[in-house]
Amino acid sequence: MNRINVIALFVLCLSLQTSIYAQEYKHEIGGALGVSFYMGDANRTKLFMNVGPSVGLMHRYNLNLNWALKSNLVVGGISGDTRYSQNIFPNDNQVSFERAFVELGSQIEYNFFPYSDKYSYLNTRSYTPYIFVGIGLTAGSGDNMFFNANLPLGFGFKYKIKERLNIGIEFSMRKLFGDDFDVATKNNNWSLNRPFDIKSSIVKNNDWYSLTLLFLTWEFGLKNDPCCGDN
């Protein structure tokens, strides 16, 4: 009977280790550097048009080998010019703009491979592509201040350079719930806020912006396994 209890305890520990405590460190913190660009009435289809610089801080909480929660603070810049938009506006109106923005957001990530440089018996890999979705808030500078929610959708790739050190790159689109991200200055005559006088909705006439970030993170915070001790 004692032998059976020992075996049962070992199986329970292994199950907990696999499902919850397999990742050695709970947290990652680091920085990111990259570019941002805008898509909206002044740029309908072109990726990486009028790019601006972006920098950020990020924190990731590793739930297990496949799932993580991430928070980020990003500062960037966007710009646009209707002369290159391939749009024909009423009365042939043209306008250009630029603004800085700050974003605070959170996302949930899914790793396609179990991500770790340990636990080979779990078929882990020291690299993985991943996808993410979340929610955030964006504030923009200018005479016409901007503040709105954003919905980030994106994918990335990360790799463990060495124990506790990760490098990666990610691309995302941020959907905004308004049409005035490209209106940095007040204009009483005509602007890119409803330029065709079509009322905005959740799915219509909304601006977007994109982030492409190269990041480096450091892991910390050992996970405690209540069954089998520290990892």
Image (tube, rainbow, N blue to C red):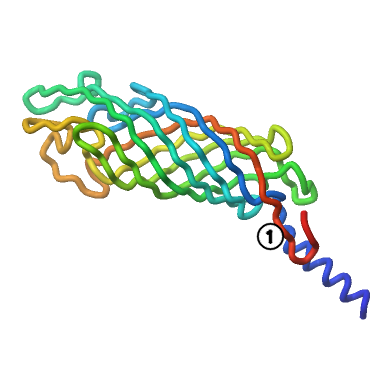
Residue positioned most to the top: 83
How far from the left and from the top, in percent, is residue 202?
26, 49
Pick whichever, 96 or 7, lies toward us.
96
Quadrant location of the C terminus in the rendered image: bottom right
Read off the residue under disc 1. 19
**Image quarter of residue 90:** top left
Callout 1 crowding tier (Cα within 10 Å): few <14, some 14–19, many ≥20? few
Q: Is 84 placed left or right of 199 in the picture?
A: right
Residue depicted at x 17% and y 37%: 193
Residue 212 in the figure: left or right of residue 231: left
Where residue 46 sits, quadrant-wise, is top left
Residue at 29%, 45% (x, y): give it: 148
Q: Position of residue 9 (x, y in %)?
A: 83, 70
The one nearer the camera, 176 or 146, is 146
Question: Residue, x 29% and y 25% (percent of image)?
Answer: 79
Q: Is residue 221 above or below residue 40?
A: below
Q: Which amino acid type is marked by label 1?
A: Ser
Q: Quadrant of residue 11?
A: bottom right
For the N terminus, the quadrant is bottom right
Residue 110, given in percent of the width and then of the height, sits at: 56, 48
Q: Secondary structure at mark 1?
A: helix
Query: What x and y, as percent, mark residue 50?
Result: 34, 21
228 w.r.t. 97: above or below: below
